[in-house]
Image (cartoon, rainbow, N blue to C red):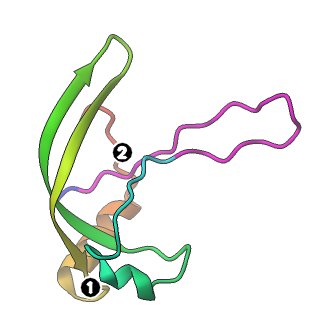
């Protein structure tokens, strides 16, 4: 499995001297669907496997986006071959904008 590392979009500094935080794509999910999250520490990293159904695509000259419904979710255990393979793949920084 190829995992693409996501680079955050840099937000330009506003008029204030304090820079804004970089922005990653994100998602929200109720703990009803991911009860494991109740036991996780804020800031800890986890790997999830999502089963999604694409519901929309929008493509413009300089921007594109897609919407999905999440139809299944799983947590990758922090042990074993799959975890090791994914972590190794992520450390390669193999971000490919065209993928």
Disc 1 element:
loop
Q: Label 1 neighbourhood size at 10 Å, few (<14), some (14-19), many (20+)?
A: few
Q: Which residue is mark 2?
A: 95
Q: Looking at the image, which residue is at 31% across and 14% down?
A: 60
Which quadrant holds the C terminus? top left
- All told, the count of numbered labels is 2
Residue range in magenta is 3-23
Location of residue 73 in the rendering, given as x and y in whole percent from the top left corner: 19, 69
Rounded to the nearest whole Å, what is the CA distance between mark 1 and mark 2? Answer: 23 Å
Location of residue 37 in the rendering, given as x and y in whole percent from the top left corner: 39, 79
Q: Is residue 7 magenta?
A: yes
Q: Is residue 87 magenta?
A: no
Q: Which residue is mark 1?
A: 77
Q: Label 2 neighbourhood size at 10 Å, few (<14), some (14-19), many (20+)?
A: few
Magenta-drawn stretch, dominant element (helix, strand or loop): loop
Asked whether, in this view, residue 23 is left or right of residue 36, the answer is right
Q: Looking at the image, which residue is at 49% across and 48% down?
A: 24
Location of residue 90 in the rendering, given as x and y in whole percent from the top left corner: 35, 61
Q: Quadrant of residue 32?
A: bottom left
């Amino acid at each position: 499995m190829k995992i693409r590392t996501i680079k955050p979009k840099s937000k330009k500094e506003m008029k204030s001297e304090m820079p804004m935080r970089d922005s990653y794509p994100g998602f929200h999910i109720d703990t009803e669907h991911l009860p494991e999250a109740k036991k996780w520490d804020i800031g800890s990293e986890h790997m999830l496997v999502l089963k999604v159904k694409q519901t929309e695509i929008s493509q413009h000259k300089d921007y594109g986006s897609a919407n999905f419904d999440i139809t299944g979710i799983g947590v990758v255990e922090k042990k074993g071959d799959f975890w090791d393979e994914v972590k190794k793949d992520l450390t390669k920084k193999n971000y490919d904008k065209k993928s």
